[in-house]
Amino acid sequence: MKLFCHSLPDESYQRLLPPTLLEGSLQALHLEATLQELQRYDFHVELDCLGLELAQMFEQHPLLPGAVLTEQGRFAGMLSRYRLLEYLIRPHGTDFFLQEPLRVLYSYARSDLLIVASATPIVVAAQQALRRSPELLGEPIVIQVAPQTYHLLNIHTLNTAYWQIRGVETQVRYERTQAQMIQSDKMASLGRLVDGVAHEILDPVSFIWGNLSHVSAYSDSLLHLLSAYEAHLETPPDALVQLRDDLEIDYLQQDLPRTIASIRTGAERLSKLASSLQNFCHIDEVYPKPTDLHELIDGILLLLKSRLTSEIRVVKQYGQLPPVLCFAGQLHQVFMNILTHAVEALIEPAVSQQLGHDFKPSQQHVTTPPVPQPTIAITTEIRTAIVGGKSSRWVAICIADNGPGLTSEDQTRIWESFSVKKRAEKETSLAVSYQIITAKHGGKFEMRSRSTVSEPSPTIADVQLRGVPEAFTSKHSATGTEFELWLPLV
């Protein structure tokens, strides 16, 4: 910038301290990188300094994008290198502006500034910079580090970092998409495999179930015939008496109906289990179908029976529900996720309670408060709610446990995982359930929890997501976690 033939006394030039280049973080940029990790300049100039002083400083530091203007140490604005050149190349610009204080030049060159906090993500700052008017797109960014501490960021440095992050984001999105495709293919293959196994189970079960009625009828006929022979043959031969005693006919007559009933019960349970497996695998339905929600929940409880220890009690309070139009396979997944969450919350209290009962039998004389049995309560009912000024009917499914509950931090983390951004980074089982209920079925998903440590329970509105209407709120117990799902009735 060889525009200046003027010179200044040394004592006047010493008023300006040279700029400081802050290197920022040397680590590789990532999706959540902030402006603090970029290279920026710390350079402050008082408004009473001459324009020539600033111009000579720009000439000595060609990469310096501008200067932060201050007045008695307080922030007053920003003057960029390009804005200074713009006014100096005008007719008589060097004669007029170089010998005057910067206050005069800034009164002409003042423009809208983009001031952002140092903790602002690079992606957000770049988007804000791109939304400026065309004549300001080349202006540097003012970064506020402290109440009266400001740094300058070259717009080219910001754009370069932004496109690097976009490249990383594209690569991460591609890798995540590939992983999701592989996972979806694996789940589809697993679903087909389980569906085939369930079908192979159902075939012999159907054979057993279909012949049980005949076996029961045949056995009843034979026992009836045997009773008739005994009634008409008062003095049977000794050989028949011995054979009757060896076969324990009296016990056989009593036990055979019970044996057939047990086989029928086992075949029925096995048939329900195979049907539940088939329903759980059918998650790729195109159109919703009328479904019995109670049957869905009972099927999931049957699949979880191996994890439901004898110490965990399941209390079902089913209301009178009509068939609900829904995607049954996806609701299977929702109920599985929520019930698994409840079982995992109750396993430790159940084991502790059982151990306390087994190893402290001699302390019966000590009066201790009763410990509630680990319980999962499932309630269904039809409710009417006012949403948007209109009355509508909903099916409410409440799944609650009396476990230790979730802390407010855990609840906030769960609510945040329901957002689109967090769900794109990592899909949790509860986030998938939230998506299925709200987006796929147009319903409502509410979670309430109170841990053993008394603290407020955050809601979805506390993390600036879509709020829940007052009609969807209800009281919850002192401890434990409660999930409440609302599905619209068409």
Image (cartoon, grey):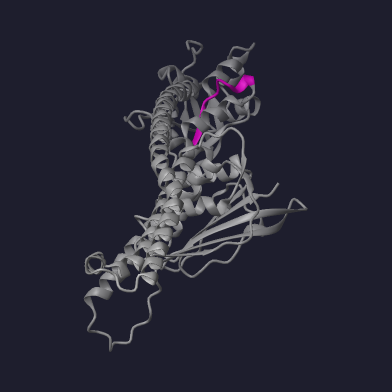
The location of residue 449, given as percent across then percent down, is 48, 61
Is residue 69 rendered magenta in the image?
no
* 66 relative to 120, above or below: above
Residue that appears at 54% across and 66% down: 476
Is residue 137 rendered magenta in the image?
yes
The location of residue 65, given as percent across then percent down, is 48, 23
Residue 15 in which image quadrant: top left
Question: Which stretch appears magenta?
Answer: 134-143
Residue that appears at 75% across and 50% down: 388
**Viewer-nearest residue: 368 or 109:** 368
Residue lying at the far bottom in this picture: please name it: 365
Q: Is residue 27 left or right of residue 191?
A: left
Residue 227 in which image quadrant: bottom left
The location of residue 107, given as percent across then percent down, is 64, 29
**Viewer-nearest residue: 76 or 191:** 191
The location of residue 184, given as percent across then percent down, is 43, 31
Q: Is residue 5 left or right of residue 91?
A: left
Question: Residue 255, can we see it?
Answer: yes
Label count reads 0
Residue that appears at 44% across and 51% down: 214
**Viewer-nearest residue: 227 or 16:** 227
* 365 relative to 22, above or below: below
Residue 311 in which image quadrant: bottom left
**Viewer-nearest residue: 268 or 306:** 268
Question: Residue 147, can we see it?
Answer: no
Residue lying at the far right in this picture: please name it: 389
Q: Is residue 306 left or right of residue 115?
A: left
